[in-house]
Image (tube, helix red, strand yellow):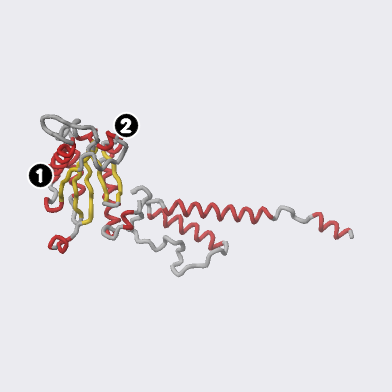
Amino acid sequence: MRRKRVSEEHVNQERWLLSYSDFITLLFAFFVVLFSSTYRDNQAIRKLSRAIHNGFQTLGAFSADESGSGGPYASLAEDQEINSSRVHNNEINHNPASAGSAADMLKLEQQLEATMGKELANHEMVLNVTPEGFVISLKELGFFNSGQDELLPGAGEKIERIAKILSRPGIEIRVDGHSDDQPIHNAQFRSNWELSTARAMTVLRLLVDDGGFDPTKISASGFGQYRPVADNSTPEGRRMNRRVDLVVVQSRGPQAHAQ
């Protein structure tokens, strides 16, 4: 009876903590993997995935894989690009016409962010991914005076820097002019359509004449106030709508041109 009492006194009543700690560890690893799946640096993804995989393999949770390195990202090529959640947007990957150039579009965005960082920080430019393609929005704030199609001092140099990045094989550009919904009646323009088209042509001529962009891979159009990206009822919304969009699309190739 004395031995039985001693054994009962030493029964561990906190063994549930071991299972609980295992659950917390697995939950932490799950969220780390979710975070790493959206991270842009492939090297970091591979290292993190390999470390987690090997750690659980040591505990017996996973069986060894054939490569010995472990992890779902272990076989990624060194130069393979992982798209971020911002460029942002899955439209590139889901669009059959541009699916093959998703990595190129990501590289293009990175180069623009590095070259035009000041303009992006000042909200003179905005980069977006839309169903139509990768869009570089040149805001009136940094490029045009209100109601005019002449470029502001220094705006031409900014567009030339953009042209150097865009001048690469495999892409075409559509220059789209846009305005807000405030009526315009001056000696030069009778409507927002004319203003938006004139601004698009100003940017197009600079891209071709001074930026050296291939004239066979570029076009221009004006949409006036009819394709807003913000509410025209507020000054901020109207400011965002006054823009010239450079829509970067995949080249159609010689066969498409022949048709």
Given residues 222 and 8, the one toward you in this image is 222
Residue 18 in the image: x percent, y percent?
65, 55
Q: Which residue is mark 1?
A: 209
Residue 114 in the image: x percent, y percent?
28, 43
Q: Which element type, helix, strand or loop, lies under badge 1?
A: helix
Residue 245 in the image: x percent, y percent?
23, 43
Q: Residue at x 30, y 35 (%)?
A: 237
Under mark 2, the amino acid is: Thr
Q: Left or right of 155: which side holds 37?
A: right
Q: Which residue is mark 2?
A: 234
Mark in the foreground, 2 or 1: 2
Residue 255 in the image: x percent, y percent?
15, 64
Mark 2 or 1, nearer chain start: 1
Q: Residue at x 30, y 49 (%)?
A: 130
| Quarter the C terminus occupies | bottom left
Under mark 1, the amino acid is: Asp
| Quarter the N terminus occupies | bottom right
Q: Which element type, helix, strand or loop, lies under badge 2?
A: loop
Alpha carbon of mark 2 to alpha carbon of mark 1: how far? 37 Å
Q: Residue at x 43, y 56 (%)?
A: 47
